[in-house]
Amino acid sequence: MRRTPDEEALRWLRQSEADLDAAKYNFEGNIYYLVCFLAQQIAEKALKALIYSQGEEIVIGHSVAMLAERVRNYGIAIDNLADEISVLDGYYIPTRYPNGLPDGIPAQVYNKKSAEDALQLAEKTVGFAKKLLLSNS
């Protein structure tokens, strides 16, 4: 059974919210590198929810900046948020792999401040997507 665009969008939104809960849990556990990675994933999934809501059937790509541009192309006013969250793309690879950093390992490099900032951006993105998606249903 094929889902409607709204149904698929809500699936992606729900997963972004579940990931947000996981990021908060990891923040409380001082696992900051994982919070930064999850923040990128959260924003990616929230943006994909918006794109799915427009009727796209397959949304490929992981760049938050690129996905925000696709959202913008649908006439959704994401300009300020898009500028803010593009920094999350910097957490996609280096937060997971030691060779993504010049020295050290992700578990040692990412700190409370970077995790806190990333988490705030993720929350803002989910809130933005949720507001748009739930006002349309």
Image (cartoon, rainbow, N blue to C red):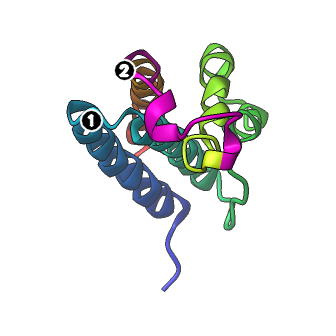
Quarter assignment of residue 127: top left
Residue count near mark 1 (Cα–Cα under 10 Å), binned few <14, some 14–19, many ≥20:
some
Query: Which residue is pictured at 36% across the width and 20% down the height?
Result: 112
The foreground one among 31 and 66 is 31
Q: Is residue 105 magenta?
A: yes
Range covered by the magenta-colored residues: 99-114
Q: Is residue 121 magenta?
A: no
The amino acid beneath tag 1 is Lys
Residue count near mark 2 (Cα–Cα under 10 Å), binned few <14, some 14–19, many ≥20:
some
Q: Is residue 44 above or below residue 119?
A: below
Residue pointed to by mark 1: 24
Query: Which residue is pictured at 64% across the width and 24% down the height?
Result: 87
The disc, 2 or 1, on the residue closer to the chain's N-terminal end is 1
Q: Is 95 on the left or on the right of 90, as rendered?
A: left
Label annotation for residue 112: 2
Q: Is residue 82 above or below residue 18?
A: above
The foreground one among 108 and 43 is 108
Query: Which residue is pictured at 38% across the width and 55% down the height?
Result: 15
Q: Secondary structure at mark 2?
A: helix
> Comparing marks 2 and 1, which lies closer to the viewer?
2
Number of numbered discs visible in the structure rendering: 2
Quarter assignment of residue 61: bottom right
